[in-house]
Image (cartoon, coloured by chain):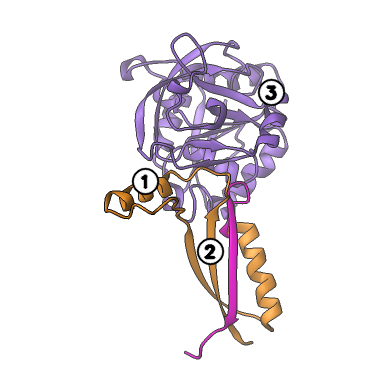
């Protein structure tokens, strides 16, 4: 299965994302420079972590003008699985593919550590290989991961199963103490209404190889593969 | 076309948490400014643009703010537009 990893000036987790995709799914990952709208027939799209456009103006704010991003928006509309990791999540929110916004961590510190997240919705394109309630250990590395949405929109998000992951403790409780950045309702990742676009702050591609400390992220990447096998897929 | 200068301020909405503002406030108080009760940190942008007239310039700056300069989820904006001083 072929994935496109979009590379913006300042993206820095694209190589890891491409490698993890290939290792976990056995498919191919093509790194696509942001200036082209040709996604090379991709069946899945990953927006990797980093500091696209130097985080100028706001994290991810300037990415939506890139030709690649216009192609991503179109592909998302056709139902292609799109995964936004960290900066990728910020980009998806700024592009309007996901609701809400990511702001400065409440502690003001850049948090670089392993956290636990609970899978809240196992029916998205990127959680199909997970179990609802499953606790995953994933690394985070961000200074602006505080997810925020106005109260009334938050209720609507929760009601439609839009929360994909919540920060939790070892027992799977969404405890405020387990929240590394102050995100509302401990939200670590969300999905769109269709379930094909998912954004999360933690890095599954950094937890896809035992040698590097954990493999809990592999299931997230493998989920898109499961979708392809089920035949419910469009092409990029 | 005549030139205009827009002075734009972008701030976090009143309901949004501003940890940066809080930290700056703590800094000010630790310097002895005990009366400081609140600090909000925002952004200031200056945009020079050509437009047919002041009204058009104002309308365009408003669109710029809504479309890019402020994130409507978390930020509010305010601006002043005036004829640009001759270079």
Q: Which mark is residue B9?
A: 2
Chain shown in orange: B
In the rendered image, residue A178, in percent from the top left (x then y), is placed at 44, 21
Q: Secondary structure at mark 1?
A: helix
Label 1 sits on residue: B23
Q: Tell me the quarter of the image containing the C terminus of chain A.
A: top right
Q: Are marks 2 and 1 in contact (CB under 8 Å)?
A: no
Q: CA distance from mark 2 to mark 3?
A: 36 Å
Between the residue at mark 1 and the residue at mark 3, the CA separation in whole angstroms equals 35 Å
Nearer to us: label 2 or label 3: 2
Question: Do tag 2 and tag 3 residues touch (Cβ < 8 Å)?
Answer: no
Q: Residues within 10 Å of mark 3 (few under 14, many from 20)?
A: some
The residue beneath circle 3 is A161
Chain identity for the colour purple used in the image: A
Residue A12 placed where, x, y %? Answer: 39, 41
The magenta-colored residue range is: B69-87
Q: Is residue A66 visible?
A: yes
Examine the rendering and report whether any part of residue A39 can be seen. Answer: no
Q: Nearer the viewer, residue A191 or A72?
A: A191
Residue at (56, 27) in percent of width and height: A185
Q: Give the residue drawn at x 62%, y 42%.
A: A72
Q: Name the quadrant containing residue A142.
A: top left
């Amino acid at each position: 299965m072929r994935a496109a990893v979009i590379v913006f000036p300042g993206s820095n987790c694209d190589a890891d994302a491409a490698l993890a995709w290939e290792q976990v799914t056995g498919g191919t990952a093509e790194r696509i420079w942001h200036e082209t709208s040709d996604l090379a027939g991709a069946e899945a799209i990953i927006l990797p972590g980093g500091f696209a456009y130097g985080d100028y103006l706001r994290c991810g704010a300037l990415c939506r003008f890139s030709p690649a991003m216009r192609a991503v928006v179109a592909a998302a509309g056709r139902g292609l699985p799109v995964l936004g990791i960290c900066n990728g999540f910020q980009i998806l929110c700024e592009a309007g593919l996901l609701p809400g916004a990511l702001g400065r961590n409440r502690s003001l510190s850049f948090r670089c550590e392993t956290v636990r997240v609970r899978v809240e919705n196992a029916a998205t394109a990127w959680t199909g290989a997970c179990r609802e309630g499953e606790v995953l250990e994933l690394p985070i590395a961000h200074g602006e991961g505080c997810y925020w949405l106005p109260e009334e929109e938050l209720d609507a998000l929760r009601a439609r199963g839009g929360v994909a992951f919540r920060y939790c403790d070892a027992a799977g409780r969404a405890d405020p103490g387990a929240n590394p950045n102050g995100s509302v309702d401990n939200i670590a990742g969300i999905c769109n209404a269709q379930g094909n676009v998912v954004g999360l702050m933690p890095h599954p591609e950094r937890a896809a190889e035992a040698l590097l400390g954990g493999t809990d992220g592999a299931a997230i990447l493998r989920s898109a593969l499961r979708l392809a096998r089920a035949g419910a897929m469009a092409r990029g | 076309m005549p030139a205009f200068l827009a002075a734009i301020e972008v701030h976090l909405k009143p309901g949004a948490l501003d940890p940066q503002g809080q930290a700056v406030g703590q800094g000010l108080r630790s310097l002895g400014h005990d009366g400081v009760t609140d600090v909000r940190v925002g952004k200031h942008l200056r945009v020079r643009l050509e437009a047919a007239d002041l009204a058009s310039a104002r309308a365009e700056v408003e669109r710029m703010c809504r479309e890019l300069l402020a994130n409507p989820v978390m930020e509010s904006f305010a601006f002043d537009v005036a004829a640009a001083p001759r270079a």
